[in-house]
Amino acid sequence: MSRKICLAILAISALQWASGAMAASQHLAQELYIKSGMEKQIQQVPNLIRSGFDQALKQDKNLQQMNRAVIAAMRDIIEDAFEASKLKKTIMQAMEQDMSPEAMQAVINWLDSPLGKKCTRLEESASTVSGQQALQRFAMQLEKNPPSTPATGTG
């Protein structure tokens, strides 16, 4: 009888330890998700996809000839497929499965540094629709006027 009680106590202790470790991993993943800027970036994904779709509609004659109901259905699919909460759930699961708590903590420590914070701010600003449009304009400008190639010396 006492052997069964000891085994039950050990099993309960193991479950409590495992659930505590899982909670710690979830907490670190949540902190990493926020501090890395992913939270703000993921919220912009539906807008970016929608904006790209709208841009394609303006430029592609085949898309323009599609039935309006089909286009509306495609927009609905975009909204559903790229819903921020769904993307977050997938990302959080992947971080918890693929990253050790030590690795997550190391990344969080770097993100808390001045350089990490600056990189996060830049990534967040670039992930908006206006940021993406500015990036496209810059790329087109570079295509039209590429920078000069630096001369190479021959030793």
Image: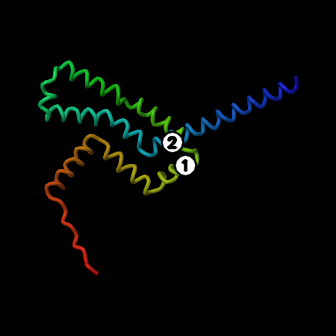
Q: Secondary structure at mark 1?
A: helix
- Image vertical order of residue 36 relative to residue 56, above or below: below
- Disc 2 is placed on an element classified as helix
- Residue 99 image point, x, y percent: 53, 44
Q: Is residue 21 above or below residue 147?
A: above
Is residue 42 found left or right of 104 in the rendered image? left
Give the vertical position of 71 relative to 142 (above or below). Answer: above
Q: Say whether residue 112 is left or right of residue 143.
A: right
Q: Quadrant of residue 155?
A: bottom left
**Residue drawn 25% across the image and 21% down it:** 73
- Other-residue count near label 2 (Cα within 10 Å), few / some / many at <14 / 14–19 / ≥20: some
Q: Quadrant of the N terminus?
A: top right
Estimate the x, y position of residue 153 in percent, counting from the top left.
25, 77
Query: Which of the two residues, 109 or 52, is positioned nearer the viewer here?
Result: 52
Q: Which mark is residue 103?
A: 1
* Residue at mark 2: 31
Label 2 vs label 1, nearer the camera: 1
Q: Residue furthest bottom?
A: 155
Q: How many marks?
A: 2
Judged from this view, the residue extending furthest toward the right is: 1
Label 2 to label 1: alpha-carbon separation: 13 Å
Residue 126 screen position, x and y as percent: 31, 46
Sooner in the amino-acid sequence: mark 2 or mark 1: 2
Residue type indicated by callout 1: Ala
Amino acid type at circle 2 is Glu
Which residue is pictured at 49% across the width and 44% down the height? Answer: 32
Q: Is residue 15 left or right of residue 148?
A: right
The location of residue 87, given as percent across then percent down, is 41, 33
Do labels 2 and 1 touch, CB within 8 Å?
A: no
Quarter-of-image position of residue 52: top left
